[in-house]
Image (tube, rainbow, N blue to C red):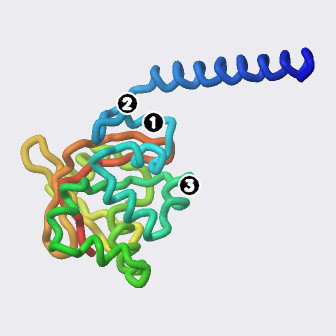
Amino acid sequence: MNTRSKIAVLAMTALSFAFSGKVTAQTMKEKTVMVGGAAMYPSKNIIENAVNSKDHKTLVAAVKAAGLVETLQGAGPFTVLAPTDAAFAKLPKGTVETLVKPENKEMLTKILTYHVLEGKYSAKDIWAAVKAGNGKSLMKTVEGEGLTFWTKGKDLYVQDAKGKSAKVTIADVNQSNGVIHVIDTVLMP
């Protein structure tokens, strides 16, 4: 390699380090929320953040199996009610393994899109809707059916069509294409 080539490689390497340092400094300035032991960055999309949460491995695998990765990386905005691995563990034994099989993709997609609202709704927005609805607010999911939000004390809950409730355990995890609210139970349409 001649001297000119060595200098070019050295310059490109230096620029690469400078750029990555700038990105790191930028992401360090963002207001993050910790979910599953990982910082969730508002400048990243739903998928880019979710894959780093140790508490959402089952959800990420299900999203991949349903072919929804590209959708949740899209512009949105989306409000995602994200069940934890512990929430999936509450389902009857074998349910998750059955749902992620290719022949059950339609049902899996239906369940996952039932956890997504079109638009970005902060916890404050949902609380306001519950107050305006005299203690309850019905919100339509991407799947098409509704979820009912309600409050108890300082806690926010969501109830599915079958009457099962989930508690929002971490609210307002902002993303570049929406917001995530972590929930403790899988909801069923």
- The mark that comes first in sequence, 2 or 3, is 2
Seen as rendered, the residue at the extreme front is: 1
The residue at 16%/73% (across/down) is: 93
The residue at 31%/54% (across/down) is: 82
Q: Amino acid at mark 3?
A: Gly
What is the CA distance from the residue labelled 2 to the residue labelled 3? 21 Å
What is the CA distance from the residue labelled 3 to the residue labelled 1? 15 Å
Looking at the image, do the residues carrying marks 1 and 2 touch, with CB atoms under 8 Å apart? yes
Tell me where residue 133 appears, x and y as whole percent: 21, 57
Q: Quadrant of residue 97?
A: bottom left
- The mark that comes first in sequence, 1 or 2, is 2
Mark 2 sits on what residue? Answer: 32
Mark 1 sits on what residue? Answer: 42
The residue at 39%/67% (across/down) is: 113
Q: Quadrant of residue 116?
A: bottom left
Mark 3 sits on what residue? Answer: 74
Locate residue 127 relative to residue 68 in the image: left or right: left
Describe the element under mark 1 as helix, strand or loop: loop
